[in-house]
Image (tube, rainbow, N blue to C red):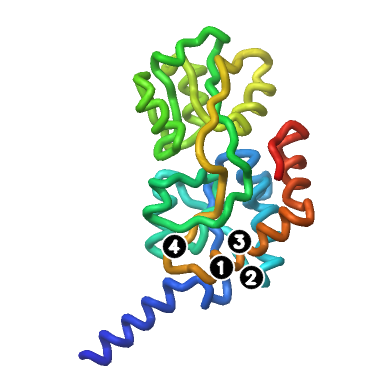
Amino acid sequence: MKKLVFTAALLALAAGSAAAQDVVRMGTEGAYPPYNFINDQGQVDGFERELGDELCTRAGLTCEWVTNDWDSIIPNLVSGNYDTIIAGMSITEERDQVIDFTQNYYPPTDSAFVGLSADADTTGTVSAQTATIQAGYVAESGATLLEFATPEETISAVRSGEADAVFADYDYLKPIVDASGGELTFVGERVPLGGGVGMGLRESDTELRDKFDAAISAMKEDGSLNALLVKWFGEDVTTY
């Protein structure tokens, strides 16, 4: 019995160590363009897909992509359903107590409010995606928080009049506002939040984290990360 228990423990340890695996599973949402989305061919696409593939190449890793709903993306990383989170996730102290992070690959950025008019009430009912730093900000602001599982639903709530405004990453909202034909508009000033976007990993996967950190550093140093940021977010994006 002791031998069986010990063997099971070793297998569990091996399963939890991404560094020992032949394939590293990259977990993303697939619903937050231009960070990540599903293209017409049904494949994960976007800034983080291109970045993640390059990081895996530089780190000498074979990677595959897995999609997961945002509201359970951290629990499913911890439970071993994939090995990284690369999904527009801001680095926060609260999250860092549960998982580990690489250095940021997207600089600290702004969040913003969007409504049907420039004088929309940002102290009224505000929609935000659940389990985001934006939802936390709205909850602490005194406004009525209306949470949704997907970012698309937060926009729909404004269009339907269910919410006065939506609060989300500026870089997510900008192309939506630009494509709305004047239906949607930014409201008030931008709000700086978070410590930049990084890759999330299990606390035990220090070797894998170090490999990705080294690859991110190399891309910052040679300018290729800045080039990707400009490609996907435009010339006005904050770069390194």
Between circles 4 and 2, the one closer to the viewer is 4
Which numbered disc, 1 or 3, marks the residue that appears first in the sequence? 1
Which numbered disc, 4 or 2, marks the residue that appears first in the sequence? 2
Mark number displayed over residue 202:
4
Secondary-structure class at tag 2:
strand
Mark number displayed over residue 213:
3
Which numbered disc, 2 or 3, marks the residue that appears first in the sequence? 2
The crowding category of the residue bearing disc 2, from other C-alpha atoms within 10 Å (few below 14, some 14 to 19, many at least 20), is few
Between circles 2 and 3, the one closer to the viewer is 3
Taking depth in this image into account, of 151 and 89 the one nearest to the observer is 89
Amino acid type, label 2 = Thr
Quarter occupied by residue 114: top right
Amino acid type, label 4 = Arg
* Location of residue 123 with respect to 205 vertically, above or below: above
In the image, taking residue 74 as reference, residue 102 lies left or right, namely right
**Residue 115 horizontal/vertical position (percent):** 53, 16
Amino acid type, label 3 = Asp
Q: Please indicate, yes or no, whether residue 42 appears anywhere in the rendered image.
A: no
* Location of residue 218 with respect to 72 vertically, above or below: below
Amino acid type, label 1 = Val
The crowding category of the residue bearing disc 4, from other C-alpha atoms within 10 Å (few below 14, some 14 to 19, many at least 20), is many
Mark number displayed over residue 212:
none
Question: In the rendered image, which residue does mark 2 sit on?
Answer: 62
**Residue 227 horizontal/vertical position (percent):** 78, 46
Between circles 1 and 4, the one closer to the viewer is 4
